[in-house]
């Protein structure tokens, strides 16, 4: 059964990936169309990356893509330097928008966003983006070697640094299994990597970039337990000593986050640690947790059905 299922699954995901890439392309064009609105000040605030600690502050941030539909309706939170905050909430609640605003893909329409007390609109965009590393859900790989793809995180890094980053992201062994090792061509026209492997490439890039702030958008697709555990370990490797923002779909990923923000219709409706949030049986988080526990049970049942058939 697995022999038959393997190739079918492979082509299925290939096709889905193609669809997704077209969607990504549209998004990219959207962004290109939007970006000219964002300009640097004639004399932006001088930023010395070595002196930035990475405290992130959102003060009553208001934003909408369409003036008729409010997307973020007064978002306030503060992440002390080096701490990890997780954003959870239903699809469309505004989690990705919060990350896009911190990266300044768009400007806020009300309130402000500060890093170490400096409004990000006063920073040069290149400085701001140099401070932030992003691990997106769908990592785009270049049609080039895997070494090139990882080095993209910091183009001046040595071969040895590239390999150390790959080790930290737990993808080194996989690469060494390819016939051409680090020279293996990847991307659309080369060896295809799975979603989890591509995300590990993005983690390796972020390890090389060593930003003050890391943003991690967890893949929403289901992962097997072993892969999920591995990703959690990698996540810890990038979030160490860094301010980290995670969009989590599986609550098991974020049990240890310093603070969890529950976003609902563009507002933060609950905040606290995992334990604190679970103490409120009427809470949204409590509800989400119970639901995921139930869903896992269903998956376990299904898995045992599959293995016994
Ligand atoms: P998900 O978990 O599905 O990724 P999310 O919580 O990250 O969802 P956002 O992507 O922040 O949600 O989207 C918030 C709202 O803004 C949604 O209603 C979405 O349809 C809308 N939206 C997002 N991006 C755009 C855009 N570029 N133009 C117009 N509307 C957008």
Image (cartoon, rainbow, N blue to C red):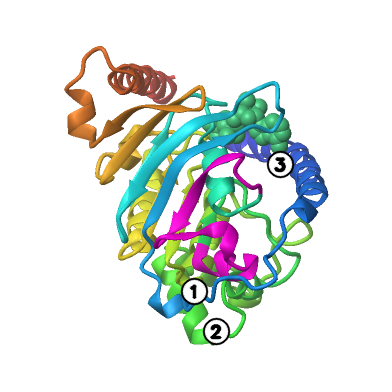
Residue at 31%, 61% in the rendered image: 82
Q: Is residue 61 left or right of residue 180?
A: left
Q: Which residue is mark 3?
A: 17
Nearer the observer, 251 or 13: 251
Q: Nearer the viewer, mark 2 or mark 3?
A: 2
Q: Which residue is mark 1?
A: 208
Crowding around mark 2 (Cα neighbors within 10 Å: few <14, some 14 to 19, many 20+) is some
Of the two numbered discs 2 and 1 on the same chain, state the one appearing first in sequence: 2
Q: Which residue is mark 2?
A: 157
Q: Position of residue 218 (x, y in %)?
A: 48, 43
The stretch in magenta equals 106-132
Distance Cα–Cα, label 2 vs label 1: 8 Å
Q: Is residue 245 left or right of residue 61?
A: left
- Rendered view: 230 above or below 211: above
Dot 1: element: helix
Dot 3: element: helix
Disc 2 vs disc 1: Cβ atoms closer than 8 Å? yes
Distance Cα–Cα, label 1 vs label 3: 26 Å
């Amino acid at each position: 059964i697995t022999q038959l299922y393997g190739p079918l699954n492979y082509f299925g995901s290939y096709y889905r990936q193609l669809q997704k890439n077209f969607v990504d392309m549209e998004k990219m064009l959207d962004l290109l169309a939007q970006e000219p609105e964002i300009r640097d000040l004639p004399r932006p605030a001088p930023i010395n990356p070595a002196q930035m600690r990475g405290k992130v502050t959102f003060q009553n941030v208001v934003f909408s893509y369409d003036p008729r539909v409010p997307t973020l309706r007064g978002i306030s939170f503060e992440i002390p330097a080096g701490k990890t905050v997780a954003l959870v909430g239903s699809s469309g609640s505004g989690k990705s928008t919060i990350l896009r605003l911190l990266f300044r893909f768009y400007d806020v329409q009300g309130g402000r966003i500060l890093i170490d007390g400096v409004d990000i609109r006063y920073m040069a965009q290149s400085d701001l983006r140099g401070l932030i590393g992003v691990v997106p859900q769908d990592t785009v790989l270049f049609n080039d070697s895997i070494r090139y793809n990882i080095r993209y995180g910091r183009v001046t890094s040595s071969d040895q640094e590239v390999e150390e980053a790959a080790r930290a992201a737990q993808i080194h062994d996989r690469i060494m299994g390819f016939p051409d090792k680090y020279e293996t061509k990847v991307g659309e026209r080369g060896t295809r990597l799975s979603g989890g492997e591509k995300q590990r490439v993005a983690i390796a890039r972020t390890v090389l970039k060593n930003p003050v702030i890391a943003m991690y958008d967890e893949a929403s697709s289901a992962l097997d337990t072993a892969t999920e555990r591995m990703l959690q370990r990698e996540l810890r490797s990038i979030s160490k000593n860094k301010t980290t923002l995670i969009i989590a779909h599986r609550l098991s990923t974020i049990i240890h986050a310093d603070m969890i923000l529950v976003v609902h219709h563009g507002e933060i409706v609950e905040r606290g640690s995992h334990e604190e949030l679970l103490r409120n049986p009427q809470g949204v988080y409590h509800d989400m947790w119970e639901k995921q526990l139930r869903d896992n049970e269903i998956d376990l049942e299904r898995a045992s059905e599959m293995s016994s058939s």
